[in-house]
């Protein structure tokens, strides 16, 4: 078992003051069989006269939402806490949603995706983990990690066509391959030690549980990852969504610190 401490900070700066700023955040890890929350907190600034609500979205992810009616030129978010991580990434689910078998806006199984799937060896009798590992290797060998090439709106097929992308793109391609293979697969977002921002990986369903693979590093996930959210694709897992009144350009800065150590009961 590992003990993890994290501190995640986001600052959205506006070129001109804005107001009536409605936001929804997915920056707090949920409690599940893989990760036990010791303590956690989420702070939003500037302080607003409107209360911030905590709840869950349709996928069961923890969300914070609120509105800042006053004029302001920045939005600051700080999420911090401590977690105990199990020795195995395994989240029990007796009946997975069939939604994770179908393509989604970012994971459509188009021509390039299907061609890559045809090139992967293996049989239907192979265990799910074995097939997923083969598909992950195919993605890893087909893609080069490169920042600034893709955007948050890039689809799996577009990223594969470029042959470059970031963790979001690696995850979308693998999800598309898994679903075409009849494997339940969903997008997962969270923290990883050594990363300066959020990371994305893939959860797949096998033997009554969700397990995970990281196609960016081409490895099965065992422990050491802090999960924030899951969904069909990035669109369901974005850290911050917002609408506001005012004409302003935005700039974003992100800081993440994750420290892990072995935990002995």
Image (cartoon, rainbow, N blue to C red):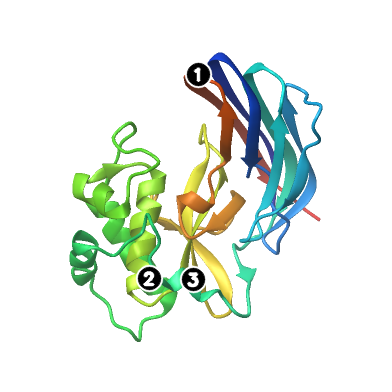
Q: Is residue 139 above or below residue 206?
A: above
| Pointer 1 local density, CA inside 10 Å: few below 14, some 14–19, many at least 20 | some
**CA distance separating discs 2 and 3:** 10 Å
- Say which mark, if any, is on residue 248: 1
Residue 136: give x, y in percent of width and height.
35, 60
Name the residue carrying label 3. Answer: 99
Q: Residues within 10 Å of mark 3 (few under 14, many from 20)?
A: some
Numbered badge on residue 151 = none
Tell me the residue at 40%/54% (across/down): 171
Q: Position of residue 73 (x, y in %)?
A: 61, 16
Quarter of the image with the N terminus in it: bottom right
Residue sticking out furthest to the bottom: 125
Q: Secondary structure at mark 1?
A: loop
Query: Does residue 28 appear to the left or right of 130 in the view shown?
Result: right
Up/down of 204 relative to 2, above or below: below
What residue is drawn where x is 24% and y is 68%? 117
- Along the line of sight, which residue is nearer the eye, 72 or 42? 72
Determine contact: label 2, label 1, CB under 8 Å: no
Instruction: Tell me the mark number nearer the camera, choosing from 2 and 3.
Output: 3
Seen at 49% across and 21% down, the residue is 251
- Tell me whether circle 3 and circle 1 mark residues in contact (CB < 8 Å): no
Quarter of the view holding residue 92: bottom right
Q: Which residue is mark 2?
A: 179
Tag in front: 3 or 1: 1
Is residue 184 visible in this depiction of the protein?
Answer: no
Q: CA distance from mark 2 to mark 1?
A: 40 Å
């Amino acid at each position: 078992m590992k003990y993890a401490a994290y501190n995640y900070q986001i600052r959205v700066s506006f070129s001109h003051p804005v107001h009536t700023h409605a936001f929804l955040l997915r920056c707090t890890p949920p409690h599940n069989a893989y990760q036990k929350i010791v303590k956690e907190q989420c702070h939003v600034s500037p302080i607003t006269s409107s209360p911030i609500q905590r709840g869950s979205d349709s996928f069961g992810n923890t969300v914070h939402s609120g509105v800042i009616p006053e004029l302001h030129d920045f939005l600051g978010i700080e999420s911090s806490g401590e977690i105990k991580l199990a020795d195995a990434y395994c989240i029990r689910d007796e009946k997975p949603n069939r939604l994770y078998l179908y393509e989604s806006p970012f994971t459509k199984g188009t021509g390039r995706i299907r061609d890559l799937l045809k090139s992967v060896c293996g049989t239907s009798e192979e265990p799910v983990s074995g097939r997923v590992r083969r598909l992950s290797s195919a993605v890893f060998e087909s893609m080069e990690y490169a920042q600034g090439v893709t955007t948050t709106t890039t689809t799996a097929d577009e990223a594969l066509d470029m042959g470059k992308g970031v963790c979001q793109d690696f995850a979308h391609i693998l999800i598309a391959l898994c679903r075409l293979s009849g494997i339940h697969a969903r997008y997962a977002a969270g923290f990883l030690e050594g990363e300066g921002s959020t990371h994305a990986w893939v959860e797949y369903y096998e033997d009554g549980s969700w397990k995970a693979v990281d196609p960016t590093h081409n490895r099965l996930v065992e422990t050491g990852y802090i999960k924030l959210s899951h969904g069909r694709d990035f669109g369901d897992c974005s850290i911050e969504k917002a609408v506001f009144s005012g004409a302003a350009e935005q700039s974003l800065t992100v800081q993440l610190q994750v420290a892990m150590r072995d935990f002995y009961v």
